[in-house]
Amino acid sequence: MSVIFRFFPTIAEEYRNINYAMKMRGINFSNHFFKMIEYRMIPLIISVVQIGNDLSFTAMTRGIDSPFKRTNVCVVKFKLLDILLIIIMAILWIIYFKEKLFND
C-alpha cells in the first residue's frame, strides 16, 4: 500500500515535466481537447508504466515477494580489525589535512 501512495507524487511530477517540456517547445493545445489528451496523457501513461515496471523489477530483485524468510550469507558486525582500520584511516586523514592546511 505504501508503494501505491508514494507513486501518486511521481505521477504529478511526471505530468509537470511533460507540461514543462511542452511549454519549452512552444506547444499549446488549449482549444483542442483531444490533442491535449494525445500530447499530454499518452506520454504520461507510457512514463508511468515504465516507472511501474522498474519498481516491480526492483521488488523482484530484492526478493520482496519471496515466501521464504530472508537470510544472510554471513553475519555482519564490527570486529577488532574494522575498528583498527577506522582509527588508522582517521589518523592518516588528520595528518594529510594538517600537512595540506599548514604547509601551503
Image: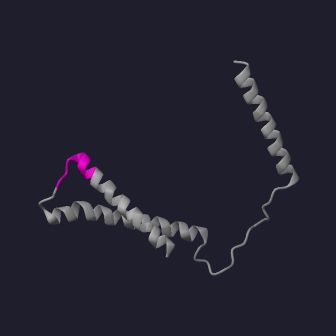
- Can the viewer see residue 32? yes
Q: Residue 44, image x and y in percent?
A: 32, 63
In the image, 72: left or right of 7? right
Which image quarter: residue 100? top right
| First to last magenta residue range | 21-28
Q: Residue 71, image x and y in percent?
A: 72, 72
Vertical side of 5 occupied by 32: above or below:
above
Q: Residue at x 80, y 45 (%)?
A: 86
**Can residue 25 be found in the magenta stretch?**
yes
- Most extreme residue toward the right is 80
Instruction: Report the predominant secondary structure element of the magenta stretch.
Output: helix
In the image, 43: left or right of 7? left
Q: Residue at x 74, y 68 (%)?
A: 72
- Of residue 18 and residue 94, the one placed in the foreground of this image is 94
Q: Residue 96, image x and y in percent?
A: 75, 29
Q: Residue at x 11, y 60 (%)?
A: 31
- Of residue 58 and residue 99, the one placed in the foreground of this image is 99
In the image, 61: left or right of 40? right
Q: Residue at x 15, y 58 (%)?
A: 30
Vertical side of 36 occupied by 92: above or below:
above
Identify the coloring.
one colour
